[in-house]
Image (cartoon, grey):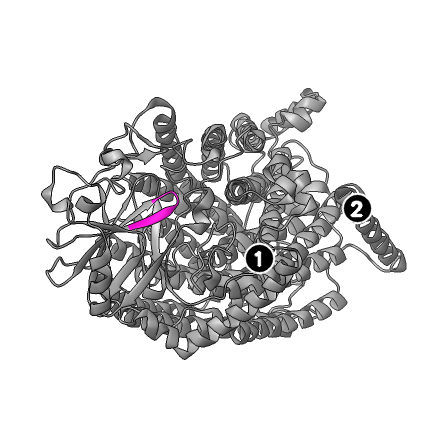
Amino acid sequence: MSTAAQVHEQDHEHHHKETFVTKYIFSQDHKMISKQYLITGLFMGIIGIAMSLLFRLQLAWPEQPFGIFEVLLGKWAPDGVMDPNVYLALVTIHGTIMVFFVLTAGLSGTFSNLLIPLQIGARDMASGLLNMISFWLFFLSSVIMIFSLFVEAGPAAAGWTVYPPLSALPQAQPGSGTGMTLWLVSMAIFVASSLLGSLNYIVTVINLRTKGMSMTRLPLTIWAFFVTAIIGVVSFPVLLSAALLLIMDRSFGTSFFLSDIFIQGEVLHYQGGSPVLYEHLFWFLGHPEVYIVLLPALGITSEIIATNARKPIFGYRAMVASILAIAFLSTIVWGHHMFISGMNPFLGSVFTFTTLLIAIPSAVKAFNYITTLWKGNLQLNPAMLFSIGLVSTFITGGLTGIILGDSTLDINVHDTYFVVAHFHLVMGISALYGLFAGVYHWFPKMFGRMMNKNLGYFHFWVTAVCAYGVFFPMHFIGMAGLPRRYYTNTAFPYFDDLADINVLITVFALVAGAAQLVFLYNFISSMFYGKEAEQNPWKSNTLEWTAPVEHMHGNWPGEIPHVYRWAYDYSKPGADDDFIPQHIPLKQGEEELQH
Amino acid sequence: MNVILIFSVLVLIAIALWQITKIFELSQEKKVNTQVATDKDNDWNGKLMFAFLIFIYALTLYSFWAYGDVLLPEAASEHGGDYDQLMWISFALIFFVQTVTQALLYYFSYKYRGEKGKKALFYADNDKLEMLWTIIPVITLAGLILYGLYTWTDIMTVEENDEALVVELYAQQFNWKARYAGEDGVLGDANVRFLQDFDGKNLVGIDATDPNGFDDVVVQELHLPVGREVIFKMRSQDVLHSAFMPHFRAQMNCVPGMITEFAYTPKTTTEAMRQNPEMVAKVKKINKIRVEKSKDLVASGDTALDPYEFDYLLLCNKVCGASHYNMQMKIIVESQKEYNQWMEQQQTFAEFIQ
C-alpha cells in the first residue's frame, strides 16, 4: 500500500465519529459483528440446552409432575405434567436452535467474522454493509423463532426436519398451525442471512489476502471457513426452495409434497405430490449442514492444537485436501437419511457407497491430529482440552456413522436412539467443543481480557465426563429398538428395562447443563473483570495476534503486515523461540518448508 | 416457590464461584498470572487425560455389562441372520479402531504434557505415513461397502411370487391395520377417497368397483405363518409413518400417495421366542421392574400393572403427532395351521360391510 493511501486511511478513521448506534448496534466492523453473533448464539444456546433438559426430565420420569414445567410451560403442562405435543415441540425447537442458530450462526458466524479479516490480513470484510445485514437478518430470524414459542397452539412440533404432511397440515397436530408458519418464515430469513454471510466470506478470502498470503499459506481455520461458506452457498438455497414450496402447499393449496390424504374425517384435495421430494430437498441441505457445522470446528481445532502442541500441524496439505474432499462428498450423500423412505433401493446402494467414502478423509484428519500431538510440548490450556475432546468425540461419533451409513444396517437402527447418540457425538458435542475451544482461545482477541483458566478446566472436565455419560449409554437404548421422538416408552412394557438408563442419562445431562453455567459465569465476568490480555498470549503464529489488543477500525495501525511463511512454524530447528509468526521474514539461508 | 428456590441456589453458586476464583487469584498474587497454562496445569491436566482414557474404557465395559441384556435378541427373520452378522463385523471393527485411536489420543496428551524448556519435534509431513492411513481405511471400507451392498440387494429385492403371502400394512394417526388378500391372493385396489363408503366401514378405503377387494380381510392384529415369505405393501392415509419391526430387522416408511414394500420370512414363532433363554431372562427382569412399580402405584391408589408377556411388535418410527409414542400393533408368528384357523374366524370385507 502506498504511503498516500495509508495516510488517507488513517485520516479516514478520525473522520468517522462513531455513535453508540453505529458502534454497538448497526456496526459494520467485523469484530463487533462477530461479538454480536457470539452473544446471540450463546443466548439461543441457553434456550436450546434448557429445552433439552426439560424433555430429558420427562424421559427419565415420564408423566411425573414437575413444578418447573408448570412455571415454564404453563397451560401446556397441566398440573405440572408435560403434554405430548409440547414434548414434540421441545425436541423440534431444540434441534432447530442448536443446529442452525447455535452451531451454524453462533459458531461459523462468530469465528468467520472475527478471524477471516484478521488472519488473512485485511482491514475488514469485503462488504461491511452486507455483513451487518447478514447479522441483523440472523437476529430477526432468531426473534421470530423465539416468538413462535408463544403462539396459541405452540411452536412447530414436527421434528427439526419438518417433514410434510405432518408439518403441512394444521389438522395433523397443533404445532403445524401458526407455529409452523413462523418456523418457515424464520428459516427463510435465516437462509438469506447465511447466504449473505457466506458470499462475503468467500469474496474476502479470495480478494483481500495481504501480500504474501498465498492460498497455501492460509491457516487451516481460514480454509475451513472458506470451504464451509462454499458448501453453504451451494446447499442453503435448496432449503429455501423446500421451505417456499412447503409454504405454498400450506397456504396456497398447491400439492408439491402432498397426495391422497384423509384426515379428521375429510378427504383433502391434494393430488400428485410426494413427501419423498421434500425429503430429498431437505437433506440436500440437511446433510451438508452437518459439515457446515463441523468443518469450522475442525478448522478451529487444527489451529489450536498446532499452537498449543508447539508443533506444526501434521500433514497440512492432507488436511486441506481432506477438507475439500469432505466438502465435495458432503453434497452427494444426502440419500443416506432416506434408505427406508420408499425411494428406489438402488439409490440406497449408491448413497451407501458415497457415504462410507467420507470415512476416508475423516480418518486422515483424525490420524493427523493424533500425530500432531506426538512428541509435542502440549500446553494444556482450556482451549486445547476442548480441542482434544473434539477429536475424541469426533472419532467415537464418527465410527458409529459406519453403521448408519450402511443401508443394510440402517434398516434396524434408523430413527432410533442409536442415531440420536451418533449425531450428538459427531456433530453436536464435537461442534460445541469447537465453539468452546474457539471462545477460550480467541476471547483475549475479542474482549482484550483473559478468561479464568481454572473455571475453564472445571468446565471442560465436567462437560467431557457428562457428554460421554449421556451419549454412550444412549447407543444401547437404540440397539434395544427404541424409536426416537417418543414422548414416553411406557406404552411398551417391552422397553420397561430401559428406565434405569434413561435416569442415568438425564442425571448426566443435568450436571452437564449446570456446568455450562460455570462457563457463562466465566464468560460474562471475564468480559468485564478478566485479567488484561497480552498481545499474543498463546505465542501463536497467525496474523490476528499482531494486531493491537485494543480494537481499532481497520485492524492494524499503519500498514498491514506482510506474510513470509506458513502459519505453522512452531519449534522450528534453528530458531530462538518455539514460534515464528507469519510476518517474520525468512532468515538468510532458512528454507520455507515445502508443504 | 420452586423457581425462587432454584434461582437463589444458582445465585449462591455464582457468588461462591466468584469468591473461590478471587481467593485463588489473591493467593497467587506474587506469581505471574496471565491465565495461560503453567507447568503445573499441564501436569495435572495431562494426568487427567490419562484418567479420562480409563474412564472411557470403564464406561464402555460397564455399559456392556449392565446394559448388554437390553439389546434385541437374535433375529426372528431369515435375512435377519445376515443382518446381525454384518452388524457384529462392523461393531468389531469400530471397537478395535475406537480402542486404539482413543488410547493414542489420550496417551499422547498425557505423555507429552508441556514443560518449560522442552522443545517439540518439528515434524510437519510424512507422505508414506499419510498414504498408509489413507490406504488402510480405503481397503477396509471397500470390504464393508461390498459386503453391505450385497446384503442390501438381497434384502431389498422383492419378487412377486405365488408362494409369498401379501399383506398390506395400513397406517393412520395413531393406529395400524393389516389387510390380507383373501382367497384370490390379490389385494383389491384402494384409495383414501373410498374411506367414507359403506358408512365408514371401509376401514382402509377398498375400491368397491374392483372385484378383487371383496374377499380381503382387514384386521387389527398381524398374524404371520412361520417359514413363509411375507411381502408387505405399506400405505398411509394421513402423514408419514414408519413400519418398524425391530425383531425382524425390518423397517419401511409409509408414505401417503404411494405404496412402499418390504419383504421377509419369519423364522421363529412367538411361542419359540418366548422360550428363548435370553428372552426369558429379559421378561423376568421386566416383570420384576413392573412389580416394583406396581407397589408404588397401589400405594398411591392406582391399579397395579399387568404382568408382561413377550410379543413381537410393530411400532411407528416416524414422528406422526401427539400419540406417535403409542402407535403399535401386536405381531403373532405361528404355524401355518394355527394361522389358517385364525384366518377362518376373520370377516372378509364383503361380510364386514353387510
In percent of width and height, residue A328 lies at: 35, 49
- The chain letter under disc 1 is B
The mark lying in front, picked from 1 and 2, is 1
Segment tinted magenta in the rendering: B172-177
Q: Is residue A121 at all visible to an observer of this figure?
A: no
Three-letter amino acid code at the position of disc 1: Thr
Q: How many marks?
A: 2
Q: Is residue A67 left or right of residue A154?
A: right
Three-letter amino acid code at the position of disc 2: Leu
Q: Are marks 1 and 2 on the same chain?
A: yes
Question: Which residue has dot 1 on it?
Answer: B303
Query: Disc 1 or 2, which lies upstream in sequence?
Result: 2
Query: Mark 1: which secondary structure?
Result: loop
In percent of width and height, residue B236 lies at: 30, 43
Of A128 and A288, the residue lying toward us: A288
Placement of B318 over or under B121, stated as above or below: above
In percent of width and height, residue A396 lies at: 49, 64
Placement of A136 over or under B49, stated as above or below: above
Q: Main secondary structure of the magenta part?
A: strand
Q: Residue at x 86, y 52 (%)?
A: B19
In percent of width and height, residue A483 lies at: 44, 55
Neighbor class of circle 1 (other Cα within 10 Å; few <14, some 14-19, many 20+) is: few
CB under 8 Å between callouts 1 and 2? no
Question: Which residue has dot 2 on it?
Answer: B5
| Real-space CA distance between mark 1 and mark 2, rounded to the nearest whole angstrom | 34 Å
Query: Mark 2: which secondary structure?
Result: helix
Q: Quadrant of the C terminus of chain A?
A: bottom left
